[in-house]
Image (spheres, rainbow, N blue to C red):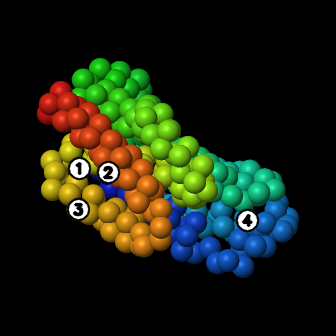
Amino acid sequence: MMPLLVLLQLLLAHILTDFVFQPTKWVLHKRKFKAASGYLYLHSLIAGILTYILLQNWKLWYIALFISLTHFFIDFWKLIHKKDNLRVFLLDQFFHLLIILAAWVYLTYGFGEIIPFIGNFFSSTAVLAIITGYLLVIFPVGFIIGKATQRWHNELLEDGKSVSLEAAGRYIGIFERILVLTFILTGNFSAIGFLIAAKSILRFSDKSEAGARKQTEYVLIGTLMSFAITIVLGLLIYHISF
């Protein structure tokens, strides 16, 4: 069986089940009645049926049954949580993806190949350099920039300025560094300029009020530090990996 084709078939079955063929009416009914909801069982059955149809191998009925049963228990786990927030949703999808990956590995490579694959994966200099690079720009670099710009942040607070939404700047910085590093590792250096221009337009388009210059300078300092550190790290990782 073609590994990529099988993976796409399993993923498509899941996407159709969870996001296309599940009306809002079903979702609300499941949240209200949980295990007593007939839609929970129907939804899980659809997951198995779609998997069976898309795999196009009628001998693999047990894979469809496996997907259907695990889909039921994962959805039931989600339903027993009182809050239906982003964290629960992401965990729900993560568990579904784990099941899909397990089925995919079983159908293509076999579980006996997992340990050698993991060993080879973490023995690659390029792979380790790239993973380390992304972890650096997501966590330590943000901490460094936060500490370096702390005095200006405090000055803005003393002036009674609301710098941004709570933690918004931190998440913006994380995503922009991920994008910059990705552009560098893929050789799309010109895209970094477009990213800087786009952020400049969004962040500095309305600075007519008095005292806004301080906030502009604060954001600009953080942005330039973020880009500079990420570019240096990206070039170093690019040199090591490619």
Residue type at tag 2: Leu
- Answer whether residue 213 is visible to the viewer in this image: yes
Q: Which residue is mark 1?
A: 183
| Residue carrying label 3 | 194
The reply, left or right, for residue 174 in relation to residue 117 is right
Which residue position holds label 2? 179
Image spot of residue 94 (x, y percent): 56, 48
Give the label, 1 or 3, closer to the camera.
3
* CA neighbours of label 4 inside 10 A, class few (<14), some (14 to 19), many (20+): many
Q: Nearer the viewer, mark 2 or mark 3?
A: 3
Q: In the rendered image of this protein, does residue 22 appear above or below residue 78?
A: below
Spot occupied by residue 14 in the image (x, y as percentages of width and height) = 52, 61
Alpha-carbon distance for marks 2 and 4?
39 Å
Q: CA distance from mark 1 to mark 4?
A: 42 Å
Question: Judging from the image, what secondary structure is the residue with disc 3 in?
Answer: helix
Compute the Cα span from label 4 to label 3. 46 Å
The foreground one among 149 and 209 is: 209
Are the residues flagged by discs 2 and 4 in contact, CB closer than 8 Å?
no
What residue sits 26% from the left and 33% below the top? 233
Quadrant in the picture for the C terminus: top left
Q: Which residue is mark 4?
A: 40
